[in-house]
Image: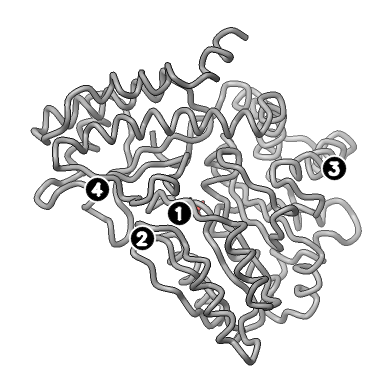
Amino acid sequence: MVPGPTPVPERILAAMHRQPIDFSGPEFVALSDRLFQDVRALFETTHPVFLYAANGHGAWEAALANTLSPGDAVLIPEVGQFSEGWRVLAEALGVRCRTIPNDWRTPIDPAAVEAALKADAMGEIKAVLMVHTDTAASVTSDVQAVRAAIDAAGHDALFMVDVIASLGTTEYRMDAWGVDVTVAASQKGLMTPPGLALVAANDKAQAAAAAASTPRRYWDWAERLSGPHYKRFCGTAPEHLIFALDEAVRMLAEETLAGAVARHRRLAEAVRAAVAVWAEGGALAFNALRPESRADSVTTVLVPDGFDPESLRGLARERYGVSVSGGLGRMEGKAFRIGHMGDINEPMVLGGLAVIDLGLKRLGVPIGAGALEAAVASLAAAPETLARAAE
Ligand SMILES: *Cc1c(COP(=O)(O)O)cnc(C)c1O
């Protein structure tokens, strides 16, 4: 029950259980050529998706190293530890970051983005860097609203969105929503082991790359699109992760993206129903203040002063075999986080909630009674539950 890495389905494990093959032979070339096409459906884009042997930080760096030059400015509307992490990485590349402060409990304010861009009369800001779902805050911000803010300001900055914690769990349409660069990673909603970074870039982003001077080779988009197949991976392909992602793309196609999004919504509602009841005890609270911006892939629960969330995490892990995450960044020691993304279903969520409920009771945290009943009632009221059981 942590927000990444998430459980890997047996089908995906089985797809990896094989010998490496010649990475420039016909079998691997055909498989990866097909995957480069098929993976675009996850982003709802027709533009190229680059695959790197890297984690989410690698995806962040790929996006920036391709499109920016040292000294360029970017605008980062803060939303949690992950917008902060992307900022730190950008600074290391020599990018000047202007942030819009945020309380880490509410979504990105599009009006503030518009105002910041309007104030940029010299056009210094080359990109807006947005985190769709911040996995620390468990807040999902509105991509279309931020796009509309950029348009309303009449600014031509690139629009980059981190969907590492939302792809495959939450509606996202790269092309229709006017996003120029999307960054993702394998180990969250995509149910694949950690180690693959996915970056989609449209024509505008690739044109910016042609003019950008940050030194790069491994990350370089133009290099990857040029010439022989092995350049697509800048050397030996991470074959087993490619086999895994290929199977994950197939599984998500079978479920349909809309089906996966609906499943995450249904399970998230059950988690939120339980957290709302726990909160009646007066000690725990949702970190995300606005119900409509609570993430469907992870829920951050604030704990009271004097209660160490590590005690809950330790009990859940050591006694019951359930992993729960802690707070990150400024929420370290002040929160625990329930991941509900990827290959998860009703019994997993109910089991995880039951263990947390039990742990909170054993540790003497005052909580409202009936959290599990509320989670079950929420699932019982979701029409998809019956449809899915009947299939
Ligand atoms: C997990 C995560 C990252 C970082 O990914 P790593 O694979 O740990 O480098 C970045 N952004 C978001 C939104 C994430 O959830």
Q: Residue at x 63, y 47 (%)?
A: 172
Q: CA distance from mark 1 to mark 3?
A: 32 Å
User: Which element is circle 2 on?
Assistant: loop
Q: Amino acid at mark 3?
A: Asp
Q: CA distance from mark 4 to mark 2?
A: 12 Å
What colouring does the structure picture have? Answer: one colour
**369 in relation to 52, above or below:** above
Position of the N terminus by quadrant:
top left
Q: Name the residue beneath numbered marker 3.
A: 33
Q: Residue at x 80, y 60 (%)?
A: 224
Q: Amino acid at mark 1?
A: Asp
Q: Name the residue beneath numbered marker 4.
A: 302
Mark 3, other Cα within 10 Å: few <14 / some 14–19 / many ≥20: few
As drawn, the label of residue 104 is 2
Residue 244: percent from left, percent from top? 66, 33
Please name whichever residue, 47 or 219, is drawn nearer the observer in this view of the structure.
47
The answer to whether mark 1 is within 8 Å of ligand 1 is yes
The quarter of the displayed image where residue 298 is located? top left
Mark 1 vs 2: CB contact within 8 A: yes
User: Which element is circle 4 on?
Assistant: strand
Please name whichever residue, 192 or 391, is drawn nearer the observer in this view of the structure.
391
As drawn, the label of residue 134 is 1
**368 in relation to 52, above or below:** above
* Disc 2 versus disc 3: nearer the observer: 2
User: Which element is circle 1 on?
Assistant: strand
The answer to whether mark 3 is within 8 Å of ligand 1 is no
Which mark is first along the chain, 4 or 1?
Answer: 1
Q: Amino acid at mark 4?
A: Leu
Mark 2, other Cα within 10 Å: few <14 / some 14–19 / many ≥20: many
Please name whichever residue, 107 or 203, is drawn nearer the observer in this view of the structure.
107
User: Which element is circle 3 on?
Assistant: helix
Residue 290: percent from left, percent from top? 37, 50
